[in-house]
Image (cartoon, rainbow, N blue to C red):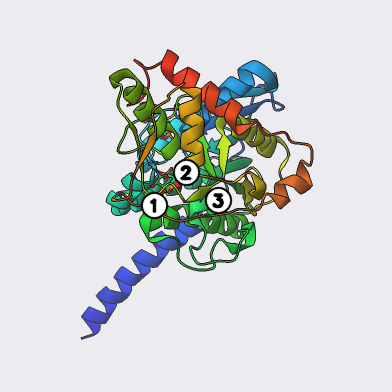
Amino acid sequence: MADVDEERNDNLLTYVMAEQSDRSTPPPAKIPRPDEEKKIVLVTGGSGMVGKAIRTVLEEEEANEKEEWVFLSSKDADLRSMDETRALFAKHHPTHVIHLAALVGGLFRNMKYKADFLRENLLINDCVLHCCYEFGVEKCVSCLSTCIFPDHTTYPIDETMIHNGPPHSSNFGYAYAKRLIDVQNQAYHEQHGCHFTSVIPTNIFGSFDNYNLEDSHVIPGLIHKCYMAKANNTELTVWGSGKPLRQFIYSKDLGRLLLWVLRNYDEIEPIILSVGEEDEVSIKEVAEMIAEAMDFKKPLVFDTTKSDGQFKKTASNAKLKRYLPDFKFTDIKQAIRESVDWFVKNYDQARK
Ligand code: NAP
Ligand code: GFB
């Protein structure tokens, strides 16, 4: 009998020691840098729509010589792999990270792949945030989404309501993985004093979006469908009743706000990045704006056999307005016109 207990104790000890040693990993060594002043900003998901918007804003408006930017795609590293993520951080030694990389998609993709949305995003977020800790990253800004908020809630939604109940059934895989980023940020802050925070945008649209008809969000999906309907002289079919309500933020406005958050926002708590509640529009209204921008004259058809998803997720941007009372959002009609023009001009290269 003694032998068995001894062996069990040995195993336990080995396990605890391993855990202990892991838990007491010394804080990461400070990497001497040629220019201590310089920020090295790593943008995961830099090849996606929001990543490209940040790049455009930097090129057009907000460059800062004290910042070196590295925009990543999945070709640089599969961020579901801790080894590949560590190798990437060892290569670039970032001081700051904007974490955008994720498995992303519209209502219909989310409904179909809930387990993939949960697991892939959990893996990506764990690898990126733990490497931010291991490599002593000074600040990490991750991207959540207003679809993570509870489905049964009072409106408008604000930042304090994230964990107040289950999200909408259509995207709970994605929603819970994103909610956990807020939990991870709090945990790394409390245990290691890390400065990891997050932003919560509403539905985003703009150039470089994903226009795949099955996987996309509503605006790129309708832009693509309207383009084809015009070419084939057919009707434009809007999925669902057209009644759901959404707040849409233009990717370039989000790019500007993400630069502000990286450079100025000091809370660990998340902040909603959105147009005001008064700018909420119905899917029917946004479809009409796209048809107008595409100079499409045929009537819209609503396919009510398709899901409407969540009816609304009206978010308050009061916290943002307290920080940036004068921030000007691009008029949605103007933003849709620019998005349509980009798609028509880049039809062959666009993700479809
Ligand atoms: P996107 O255009 O689909 O881009 C996704 C990015 O993530 C791409 O750069 C992709 O790289 C990268 N990526 C995906 N899986 C990866 C992996 N395993 N390893 C490394 N990189 C990987 O997405 P987006 O619309 O710009 O979204 C950016 C962020 O905003 C995401 O965190 C998303 O959850 C959030 N968000 C989006 C919306 C919206 O309406 N689009 C709304 C709220 C929040 P490749 O280019 O190589 O594939
Ligand atoms: O943008 P969307 O796919 O995402 O759909 P959610 C918004 C609304 O547009 C739904 C209607 O009511 C759809 O029924 N819709 C009409 C269409 N025509 C189309 C179309 O051609 N394509 C698409 N996709 N929708 C997502 C979440 O919810 O919001 C994601 O599932 C993410 O996780 C994203 O958070 C921002 O706004 O319904």
- Give the alpha-carbon distance from disc 2 to disc 3, as whole Å: 52 Å
Tag 1 secondary structure? loop
Three-letter amino acid code at the position of disc 1: Asp
Q: On the picture, is 233 further left or further right than 249?
A: left
- Give the alpha-carbon distance from disc 1 to disc 2, as whole Å: 9 Å
Going from N to C along the chain, the mark reached first, 1 or 2, is: 2
Q: Is residue 70 visible?
A: no
Residue 173 percent coordinates (x, y): 37, 55
Which residue does the numbered mark 1 point to in the structure image? Answer: 308
Q: Residues within 10 Å of mark 1 (few under 14, many from 20)?
A: some
- Front of the two marks 2 and 3: 2
Report if the beta carbon of the residue with label 3 is closer than 8 angstroms to ligand 1. Answer: no
293 is higher (above) or lower (below) than 242: above
Residue found at x 61% / y 48%: 197
Residue found at x 72% / y 33%: 328
Going from N to C along the chain, the mark reached first, 2 or 3, is: 3
- Front of the two marks 1 and 3: 1
Q: Residues within 10 Å of mark 2 (few under 14, many from 20)?
A: many
Tag 2 secondary structure? helix
Which residue does the numbered mark 3 point to in the structure image? Answer: 26
Which residue does the numbered mark 2 point to in the structure image? Answer: 283
Q: Are marks 1 and 2 in contact (CB under 8 Å)?
A: yes
Three-letter amino acid code at the position of disc 2: Ile
Residue 28 percent coordinates (x, y): 56, 44
Report if the beta carbon of the residue with label 1 is closer than 8 angstroms to ligand 2. Answer: yes
Q: Nearer the viewer, residue 60 or 180?
A: 60
Three-letter amino acid code at the position of disc 3: Pro
Q: Is residue 67 visible?
A: yes
Q: Quadrant of residue 310?
A: bottom left
Q: On the picture, is 60 further left or further right than 2?
A: right
Residue found at x 27% / y 75%: 8
Report if the beta carbon of the residue with label 2 is closer than 8 angstroms to ligand 2. Answer: yes
